Image: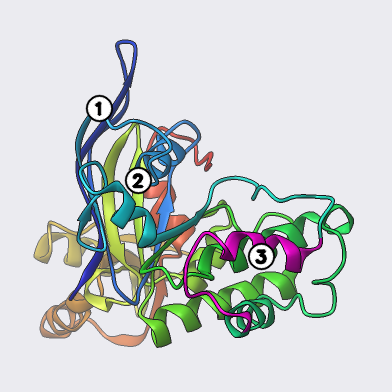
């Protein structure tokens, strides 16, 4: 699959302190990648280096096939982004802000401006001055600006800030539409893990400046599940299963047998129990949420996400 972003061994130091260490990950065309990390993990620093807002100490960034250091103009033309709060001319209307930005990119038509206005649901307020906009409206205007020139890669840092539930859903629908229909790769950070789970195809987790995990949210075989197994004697079943499957941990809790295993291993587990003569009445899987995954992966961070 075509990669619209490749980050290889990216490093950033402030004095002797390593802020980002050998960060390596990629974003594919047509996918939404969530970028998560505890407070101070290096997430925003990494994004700023990708966008050319911070100097890269070492490593490589390629955007749309262009080296971000050696071919900066081509790389910039291939990416759109919002870091923190989008900057706008508050004394001008939303439409006028988009028109000014459009002048920086040849070929952006009035029809395209109208299209992105419609996509972010600002049609009824687009001719109001930006100083009258709520924070959520400014965020949506920033998204419109970022996608206007049809970038191959879109980078958004906390784009859901200030949006109400309907606004968040509309943003999610817009980004998924961009990814699926136009093949845009999206790298997005957010502290709203439940929303990221709904929005993203994959997530990349950074902690202590290092990429510690990349997970496909739709690949069942990569997901661990907590299993609640109804058996005749949970205590005896736990002892038997611990002997037969020593690499798994079994406990008897609330009258059921509990264990955690990969999704693809469930048939083997059930077959082993049946062969051992254990009577199984029900197997209830409980899929780990993105929040569970995040907390398990970032041990020691106390789950304080940025």
- Does the CB distance between marks 3 and 1 fall below 8 Å? no
Q: Which mark is residue 98?
A: 3
SS under mark 1 = loop
Q: Residues within 10 Å of mark 1 (few under 14, many from 20)?
A: few
Would you say 130 lies left or right of 289 here?
right
Q: Is residue 188 visible?
A: no
- Does the CB distance between marks 2 and 3 fall below 8 Å? no
- Give the extent of the magenta segment: 93-110
Q: Which residue is mark 1?
A: 57
- Quarter of the image with the N terminus in it: bottom left
Say above or below: 301 vs 268: above
Residue 3 x/y as whole percent: 22, 67
Front one among 44 and 40: 44
Residue 299 x/y as whole percent: 37, 38
Q: Residues within 10 Å of mark 3 (few under 14, many from 20)?
A: many
Q: Nearer the viewer, mark 2 or mark 3?
A: 3
Residue 193 x/y as whole percent: 53, 59
Q: Earlier in the sequence, mark 3 or mark 1?
A: 1
Q: Residues within 10 Å of mark 2 (few under 14, many from 20)?
A: many
Residue 288 x/y as whole percent: 41, 65
Residue 233 occupies which quadrant of the picture? bottom left
């Amino acid at each position: 699959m075509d990669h619209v972003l490749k980050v290889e061994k990216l490093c950033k130091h402030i004095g002797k302190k390593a802020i980002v260490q050998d960060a390596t990950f990629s974003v594919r065309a047509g996918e939404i990648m969530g970028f998560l990390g505890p407070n101070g993990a290096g997430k925003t620093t990494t994004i700023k280096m990708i966008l050319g807002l911070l100097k890269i100490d070492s490593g490589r960034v390629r955007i749309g096939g262009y080296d971000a250091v050696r071919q900066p103009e081509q790389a910039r033309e291939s990416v759109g982004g919002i870091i923190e709060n989008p900057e706008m001319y508050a004394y001008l209307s939303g439409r006028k802000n988009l028109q000014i930005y459009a002048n920086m990119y040849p070929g952006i038509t009035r029809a395209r401006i109208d299209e992105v206005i419609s996509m972010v649901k600002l049609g009824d307020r687009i001719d109001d001055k930006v100083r009258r906009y709520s924070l959520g409206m400014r965020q949506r205007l920033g998204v419109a600006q970022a996608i206007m020139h049809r970038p191959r890669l879109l980078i958004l840092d906390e784009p859901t800030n200030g949006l109400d539930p309907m606004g968040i859903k509309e943003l999610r629908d817009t980004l998924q539409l961009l990814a699926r229909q136009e093949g845009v790769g999206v790298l997005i950070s957010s502290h709203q893990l439940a929303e990221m789970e709904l929005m993203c195809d994959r997530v990349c987790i950074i902690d202590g400046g290092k990429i510690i995990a990349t997970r496909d949210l739709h690949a069942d075989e990569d997901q661990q599940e907590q299993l609640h197994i109804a058996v005749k004697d949970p205590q005896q079943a736990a002892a038997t299963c611990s002997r037969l499957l020593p690499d798994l941990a079994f406990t008897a809790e609330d009258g059921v047998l509990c264990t955690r295993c990969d999704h693809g291993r469930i048939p083997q587990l059930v077959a082993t129990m049946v062969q051992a003569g254990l009577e199984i009445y029900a197997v209830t899987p409980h899929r780990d949420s993105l929040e569970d995954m995040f907390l398990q992966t970032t041990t020691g961070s106390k789950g304080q996400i940025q």
